[in-house]
Image: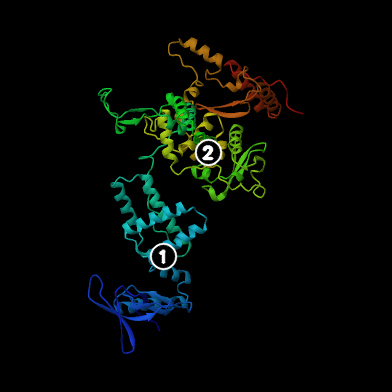
Amino acid sequence: MGTVFRQTRTRPLPAGAEVFTRAGQQFARWKPLKGKTRTAKVTTGEDGTLRIQTEAATFTAKFRNGQGVIREVSTRCRDEDAARSVLSKLERRAELVRSEIISPAEDATADHQLTPLAQHFAAFREHRTAKGLTSIRIDNTKSKLDRLAKECGFGRLADCSADALTRWLNCQQGNGMSPGNRNEYRQELVGFGNWCVETHRLSVNPFSKVPTADAKLDCRRQRRSMTEAELVQLLEVARWRPLAEYGRESTSADDKPSEGAGTKRKRSNWIKAALKLNGLQAAVERARECLAKNPDFVAKLERLGRERALIYKTLVLTGLRKGELASLTVGQLDLDAPMPFVELDAADEKNRQGSTIPLRLDLANDLREWLSDVPNVSTLRLRNHNADVTSDRKLFRVPAGLVRILNRDLNTAGIPKRDERGRTLDVHALRGTFATLLSKGGVAPRTAQAAMRHSTIDLTMNTYTDPKLLDVCGALDSLPSLNLNASPSTERNAMRATGTDGRDISRSTDSPKNSPDAGKSRLLGSFAVIASGNADRRTTRKANAENLTKPKEKALFAGFASKASQVGMTGFEPATSTSRT
């Protein structure tokens, strides 16, 4: 037989509390900031300090469940009669489990409905931490789930419903939230629901049927790829801008002309002129003159610019993400292999699989030269963690504010941050530039997908490849010429000469036997064309004619070949051999 009771808890003695003894028992009396004076029993804690005993505001039910285990469950009821009603329901469910009417898993699912949602979120966080997800991703998920639980009114699992989530998404749409952002919130809650189903906390996911928004209709941030000329300018600016910043000229902050030579020059009236690409080298020379007495600082600025330029070049030529590049150490490089490469650890990759990233020879030479200036680093032992004590050294010091540094470099290089279509450039756009340059260079789509380490080819071709930089105009030159001013006979003769007069080009005597398309089926307009050698076709047809054993079939074949010769279809000859013996 179960029972209900109020749990007793202890907490530290309130500040300013008066301790007194009554009937051999110690009590504490204090007055909160708001309310009447309160009194509670005093006990001694494990650390020897005085603590007060307080009772919970709600009742707790104590009973034996279907497996015979004694459990204590909060009824969330302040009234004892209501708490006993909850106890009777719990005992009724335990009887159903013992009589095998419901399974223990169904009973556990029912128990989870009364657990506060915050406890489920904490367990879900531990599950994702055990999977090895990054702390940034786990924290983002927690913040989204906490916001959804607060604004949708989800206090327990029993409160979760698709209708509440749908209303919240519609409300956020009215407040201007982008479709992609709304889909992210929905996806986090769907993932939590799937985990609850896997751990038998829910029987079904209540959020799986909530529709997603079409992110293509209102894409707030579209990235573009950089051209080769823009990349050259960006690398030049990144290489020299840290030093050129100290060689900028001073200019008047006011548009007003100077009041005269005798006017006192105030520091507040003068500012540093903005750097431009055409004046970059002049600013570098002025900086060298100004810092001539501090050569170590000049060398530090030059190395900083060299590192930034090498960071951009590595991102463009490898397709690495910013976080992946920041995680690389010297020990993950192999620059002396026949094909230099870098090993990306699974813990640092987005899909948690680990990859071997090939390096182009010029990039490998730049990295070798970059590491030659690092003390105690041998390029022959880069991947030998036991032999080289500096193998755990970071390859680059990728700054957290790299996107702001890129914005300054773009401004100096005269490269617009946003193009005429509203597409922007950021650090991740360098990865899109890598994919676009692969397609522009004629790399096969499947090879580009492998280089980008994408799960689907659609992501490589449609999301990361910028069609604006592809040679679409050059592709149009491969289409046939259609002259509107030529006479019909002239146009027909020209088309017959090029083999595009509507005849089956697979039967033309002028088609090469060993053409690249020989033996391959193509679909040109609405005609199926099979390109193959004429000599092979004649041999095949003669063999087929010889294989005809019935006189009626031989007569039909001979008649068809005769009509084909009359209308100008080459490659058909009357059968000359008799039936096979």
Q: Amino acid at mark 1?
A: Gln
Of 343 and 197, which appears nearest the observer? Answer: 343
* Most distant residue in the right direction: 581
Residue 213 vs 224, above or below: the answer is below
At a point 42% along the width and 78% down the height, the residue shown is 48
Element type at marker 2?
A: loop
Q: Which residue is mark 2?
A: 319
Quadrant occupied by the N terminus: bottom left
**Measured along the vertical axis of the image, is residue 541 above or below residue 566?**
below
Mark 1 and mark 2: Cα distance apart in space: 40 Å
Q: Quadrant of the C terminus?
A: top right
What amino acid is found at the position of numbered circle 2 in the picture?
Answer: Gly
Q: In x, y percent, where is residue 84?
A: 33, 79
Label 2 neighbour load within 10 Å: few <14, some 14-19, many 20+? many
Left or right, residue 551 beside residue 290: right
Please indicate, yes or no, whether residue 539 appears anywhere in the rendered image: yes
- Viewer-proximal residue, 412 or 208? 412
Q: Residue furthest bottom?
A: 23
Q: Residues within 10 Å of mark 1 (few under 14, many from 20)?
A: few
Does 67 sit left or right of 165 as displayed?
right
Residue 357 location, quadrant: top right
Residue named by callout 1: 119
Q: How is the image coloured?
A: rainbow
Q: Is residue 7 visible?
A: no
Q: Earlier in the sequence, mark 1 or mark 2?
A: 1
Give residue 154's position: percent from left, percent from top.
Answer: 34, 61
**SS for callout 1:** helix
